[in-house]
Image: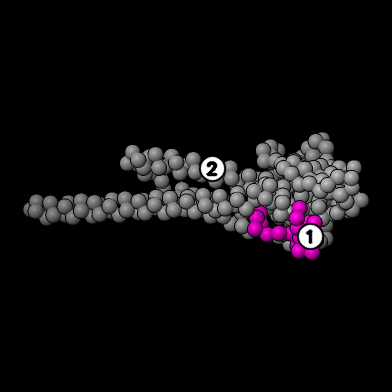
Amino acid sequence: MELFTFKAFAFGGELDLNRLAVKLGLSRKYRWEEPMKLNPVTFALATGNDEERVYLYYFGGVVFLNCSGDLIARFLDSIPQYAESLKGQIQLPYREEYRLEIDPAREPAIVNDRAVMPRYNLAFLDIICFVIAKSVALERIEERVDMVFDEVEGLIANLGKGKLELPDRDMARLASSILSFKFTSIAHIMVLDKPDITWDNSEADRLYTTMASLFELSQRYLEIKHKSETLLDMTDVFTSLSHARRSARLEWIIIVLIAIEIVLYIWKP
């Protein structure tokens, strides 16, 4: 039996692979859906002979193939010197682990923590990396969405007490965060996209479809989308109330100024 182990993490944001390639002295260009595959020791492009590999994705996912804990730690300590956006990201709370077992004597099986295939195919490695990298990136977004929900919950509680104290700058920041959730999950994490290899390889397509279902990628994306739309609706309400309060305040200021002008006119000698 041949065993492949996968450990996926999510960085705090996006990763510019083309800029990273320049820093590493790599001459190739990367499309937004294409991962960078590196040797974790030499930081050179990985080849088919490399048993240990690192997959880096534009959306901030990183997957280690057959890498020990020490090797992962050394890579994470070294990579920030080539990528400014990764500095200060020692702690990576979002993670997934998976394993692929190649065993001709067993029936194919795809479950939550491992897949069993009768023969080796490089596409299997790419697909597993792609799915679990998506999963940890979605986990990062899910946590951020929940944090915004907590913030909005506090605003709703204050609103119930008749208080609404949120400057326009904070309102704009809140709306920007919500829109970024939707944009990142669609454009960068590519939740709705399938790898090209799945169109030509039925085994690869079955592996991707099954794993995407096991990790609930579509459902989690739809939940993020629904929560984002709900938050935007709430933001619209807060914005309307804020504008109404400002308009009422301006009206009172105008009334007071008119009253002052009348009083001055009456008492004018």
Q: Nearer the viewer, residue 162 or 196?
A: 196
Left or right of 197, for residue 215: left
Could you tell me which secondary element the residue under label 1 belongs to?
helix
Q: Which residue is mark 2?
A: 146
User: What is the quadrant of residue 16 in the picture?
Assistant: bottom right
Within 10 Å of disc 1 (Cα), the crowding (few <14, some 14-19, many 20+) is few
Q: Secondary structure at mark 2?
A: helix
In reply to whether residue 199 is colored magenta, the answer given is yes
Magenta residues (range) = 189-207
> Residue 144, position in %: x, y?
57, 44
For the point 20% across and 51% down, the residue is 256
Which disc is residue 13 wearing?
none
* Residue 17 coordinates in the image, percent (x, y): 74, 55
Q: What colour scheme does the image use?
A: one colour
Question: In percent of the image, x 86 and y 42: which residue is there?
Answer: 3
Residue at screen point 41% across, 48% down = 167
Mark 1 to mark 2: distance in Å? 37 Å
- Asked whether residue 130 appears in the rendered view, the answer is yes
Q: Can see residue 180?
A: no
Residue 120 in the image: x percent, y percent? Answer: 87, 51
- Magenta-span inclusion, residue 27: no
Q: Closest to the observer: 230 or 176?
A: 230
> Is 157 left, or right, of 68 in this rendering?
left
Badge 1 vs badge 2, beta-carbon distance below 8 Å: no
Please tell me whether residue 8 is drawn above or below residue 27 in the rendered image. Answer: above
Which amino acid is tagged 1?
Ser
Residue sitting nearer the eye, 198 or 76: 198
Q: Amino acid at mark 2?
A: Asp
Q: Decide which of tag 1 and tag 2 comes sooner along the chain.
A: 2
* Label disc, if present, on residue 202 of the rendered structure: 1
Quarter of the image for residue 41 reads: top right
Q: Is residue 4 above or below residue 180?
A: above
